[in-house]
Amino acid sequence: MRILGIETSCDETSAAVVEETGDAAKPWAIRSNIVASQVAIHREWGGVVPELASRQHIRDICGVVERALSEAGSTWTDLGAVAVTQGPGLVGSLLVGVSFAKAAAAAAGLPLVAVHHLAGHIESLVLHNGELPLPAVVLVVSGGHTNLYLVERAGSYQLLSRTRDDAAGEAYDKVAKLLGLGYPGGPVIDRLAASGDDRAIALPTTRLTHADRNAPQLKGDLDFSFSGLKTAVLRHVQIRTDVAQAGLAAQGLSPALSDKEIADIAASFQRVVVTALVERLFTAARRYGAKSVGVAGGVSANSRLRADLKVRGEQREIPTFLPSLALSTDNAAMIAAAGLRKFRAGQTASFAHG
Ligand code: KG4
Ligand code: ZN
């Protein structure tokens, strides 16, 4: 069976066709995965502007779906279902994908499957690698979320912890902004960090020991926090530029940070973020007796995170899994995959509003 996936939760309009293989170990194959990125539109504003995002989704959705079908060699008649991201995400953006999917599924007489965006990120691991050895502990680390999940059975995702403030990707984006590096921040900081000294600047690591009052059911010690780190980078930059200002203004020079200083800040920031992510992931893996660990979501494209995960997995003798780079950031193939999982579990959505 083939399924059409649609993803419009943030600033990518994406459609994909994914097919069941009949192989239980590697259940799905990608037939097409089209992503129309809006990055060029939002870059001008330094971040995603929700109203612009929804309008652009409306412009792009038909063409993106048509291309996904034609690249897959599919028509509406050879599909078995339509899967769409139902949330979380920007409401106006989600509405475009959901309305399109409902209308298309109703017109084509196909069942509709509503997919949680983070289930999509988790299933990107299976889409790329095949079924993971279970139980698995999976870190979903994106622009909006930093969540740890326990996957005991395929398709069940138990939340173990999350960030109390900024998501890791959000911290990358904010730090890049204050360094004047533009949007999105992750890829540029990742690139600059490669030439920086990751010990050049002492930045704080936040370790939480108490349950969050907003989520008392979780123990809390596996939670993340990145806003203090972001503020520490801001303070460092302010002090550094104030000092430079005092000395340089008299000579008519600009107090801008040098390329070397920016690279050092990027590398030091990245070391703290990646260390916190990897530490907590493996603490959780040990606590829950995981047979594998995975990292998914936009930040899983990060080169240091990928490298450190591999090293730590080898040390702990636990297999580690990542999506391909194309499946790390938002895409509809992962939504189609999670949709197939739900469809096979008999979970389809109604066409009614609400
Ligand atoms: O999963 P995603 O595409 O969208 C959300 O669901 O949020 O993740 C986007 C996030 C952005 O914050 C972006 O800066 C970050 O992923 N990102 C990276 C890298 N590539 C993208 N962060 C660190 N290193 C990267 N190479
Ligand atoms: Zn995402």
Image (tube, rainbow, N blue to C red):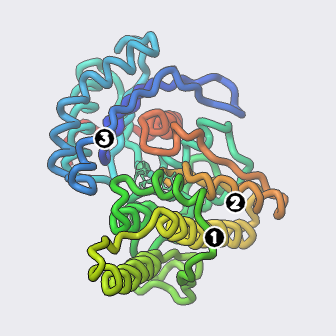
Dot 1: element: helix
Of the numbered discs 1 and 3, the one sitting upstream in the chain is 3
- The nearer-to-camera label among 2 and 3 is 2
Amino acid type at circle 2 is Asp
* Closer-to-camera residue (173/95): 173
Q: Residue at x 26, y 45 (%)?
A: 94
Crowding at mark 3 (Cα within 10 Å: few <14, some 14-19, many 20+): many
Q: Indicate left or right for 300 with 354 as reference.
A: right
Which residue is the site of mark 1? 275
Crowding at mark 1 (Cα within 10 Å: few <14, some 14-19, many 20+): some
Is residue 213 visible in this depiction of the protein?
yes
Disc 1 vs disc 2: Cβ atoms closer than 8 Å?
A: yes
Q: Indicate left or right for 259 with 111 as reference.
A: right
Of the numbered discs 1 and 2, the one sitting upstream in the chain is 1
Q: Residue at x 27, y 80 (%)?
A: 249
Q: Position of residue 276 (x, y in %)?
A: 60, 72
Position of residue 260 relative to residue 49, above or below, is below
Q: Residue at x 26, y 53 (%)?
A: 48
Amino acid type at circle 1 is Thr
* Closer-to-camera residue (31/246): 246
